[in-house]
Amino acid sequence: MTLSEFISSLINKGEVRVAHALQDFDEEEIRLAKVHLQQYYTDDINEMPGQAPPYDEKAALWAAAYLYRTIQFLLLRHLEATALTRYLPPFDDQQTPAASYSADLCLRYLPDIFLLAKGISPEDPLVTTLTALAAQWPLSAAAIPEVPAEGLSPILEHPSLKRTYIDRIILAKDYEKCRHPACLPMVEEALGMYAVQFWPQFKIDLTAS
């Protein structure tokens, strides 16, 4: 399955396949992937609260390739751990609201992949790599309890991303993230009178450290 086919299947079917060997993506594959990602963004912004950030093609393409490679390393257990550095490079540009949202088009699947990787082998170098990745992209890692609520500036400075992040940590019932000083007022507002029904264990403690 090529990168463009991977993106299309992920969006339309929620299932993916990957090549059985690590190899660079060719120019046509990348061109088609960009087309799919642009359309994915255009469709996805209709589901965002308020006005979504503008599209960042570089971040979206990087995240799609990263997700593809991650699944390769997850499924193809014969791959050398030393290849992680080459095929899973960090994003080499500024993490703006646009980059955070565009990368999230694919990285929003990170919590499920992280859980699967930990279940297969908690000490796997891939888990270490994914933990570092998750810390750098808090919007996508909102549902990963091991990742603290840090580096939130690109998210909280944008109304649409802020609302999305708050919704995700509430849905994950992540108490530690929800009681973060920057998040707690918005969590209280979002839960409102429904807190008892949705999350009866949640207690507001303004004195908590």
Image: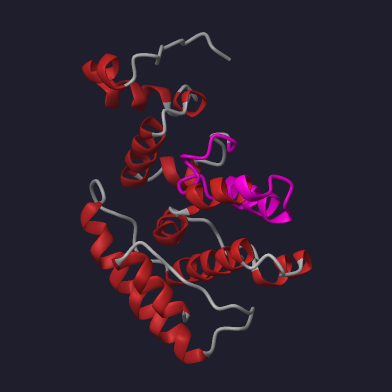
When asked about the image quadrant of residue 9, the answer is bottom left
Q: List x then y, in percent, for residue 182.
A: 46, 28
Q: Is residue 167 left or right of residue 88?
A: left
When asked about the image quadrant of residue 20, the answer is bottom right
Residue at position x 66%, y 50% in the image: 127
Q: Locate the C terminus by quadrant.
A: top right
Q: List x then y, in percent, for residue 22.
A: 64, 78
Q: Is 144 inside the magenta-drawn segment?
A: yes
Q: Is 58 inside the magenta-drawn segment?
A: no
The number of numbered discs placed on residues in the rendered structure image is 0
Specify the farthest residue to the right.
82
Applied colour scheme = secondary structure
Q: Nearer the viewer, residue 39 or 159?
A: 39
Q: List x then y, in percent, for residue 40.
A: 31, 68
Residue at position x 50%, y 90% in the image: 27
Q: List x then y, in percent, for residue 86.
A: 71, 72
When asked about the image quadrant of residue 145, the answer is top right
Q: Nearer the viewer, residue 2 or 58?
A: 2
Residue at position x 31%, y 65% in the image: 13
Q: What segment carries the magenta color?
A: 119-147
Residue at position x 69%, y 45% in the image: 122
